[in-house]
Image (spheres, grey):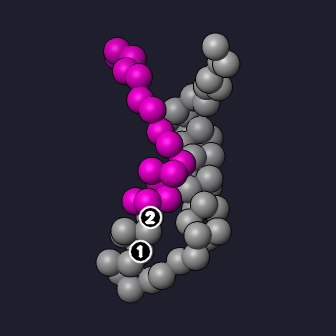
Amino acid sequence: MREIEVFIDTEEIADFFMKELVQRGYVPSEDELEELADITFEYLIAKCIIDEEWEEDV
């Protein structure tokens, strides 16, 4: 299996959740969206779908 590089941004996840939830009739708060994005990111790490890497200050 080959390795690919994927960048996942919690802000992008939050935007995705906002769009999807509004389409389903829900209007979450900004704090709720941030929590959902963080939970999703942690889930992807826990399932070994992604690895968390920190950007180095250059």
Query: What span is in magenta?
Result: 1-16
Identify the residue position indicated by label 2 in the image: 17
**Alpha carbon separation for disc pair 1 and 2:** 6 Å
Disc number placed over residue 11 in the picture, else none: none
Task: Give the residue type that dot 2 points to.
Answer: Phe
The residue at the point 53 percent across, 77 percent down is 28
Q: Which residue lies furthest to the bottom in this view?
A: 25
Residues under numbered marks 1 and 2 in contact, where contact means CB atoms less than 8 Å apart: yes
**Camera-side residue of 34 and 45:** 34
The residue shown at (50%, 43%) is 9
Picture coordinates of residue 50, whole percent (x, y) = 52, 32
* Quadrant in which residue 6 is drawn: top left
Q: In this view, does 36 lie above or below 4?
A: below
Q: Is mark 2 on a helix, strand or loop?
A: helix
Residue 20's place in the image compared with 3, above or below, is: below
Position of the N terminus by quadrant: top left
Amino acid carrying mark 1 in the image: Leu
